[in-house]
Image: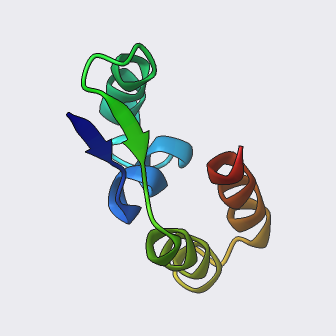
Amino acid sequence: MAVFLDTGYLIALKNKDDKNFQISQSWMRRFLKNEFGQIFTSTLVFNELVTLALVRLRNPDFAINVGNYILK
């Protein structure tokens, strides 16, 4: 099995103001324990994530931080 991380989840994971921040943190702890298999995403999600952070959230620092988080 594998886990695909999509844009909405990743925004919630790194944005403390998001209503789903806490639950996304909880799920990530489980993902990192490999409870559900390998974690992956796509370049399309990466592009959408950084673009949304810049355009919708208007937060360049957040865009850089979340982009770097994904690239780790």
4 sits left or right of 57 in the view: left
Image quadrant in which you'd find residue 65: bottom right
Place of residue 60 in the rendered image (x, y in percent of width and height, measured from the top left): 76, 72
* Colour convention: rainbow
Which quarter of the figure is the N terminus placed in? top left
Q: Residue furthest bottom?
A: 55
Q: Residue furthest left?
A: 1
Return the residue nearer the eye: 16 or 52.
52
Image quadrant in which you'd find residue 57: bottom right
Residue 16 visible to the viewer: no
Which quarter of the figure is the C terminus placed in? top right
Task: Give above or below for 71 relative to 38.
Answer: below
Residue at horizontal 41%, vertical 28%? Answer: 28
Return the residue nearer the eye: 23 or 32.
32
Place of residue 48 in the rendered image (x, y in percent of width and height, measured from the top left): 49, 78
Residue 40 visible to the viewer: yes
Place of residue 26 in the rendered image (x, y in percent of width and height, measured from the top left): 35, 22
14 sits left or right of 59 in the view: left
Residue at horizontal 41%, vertical 39%? Answer: 39
Residue at horizontal 58%, vertical 82%? Answer: 51
Residue at horizontal 52%, vertical 81%? Answer: 56
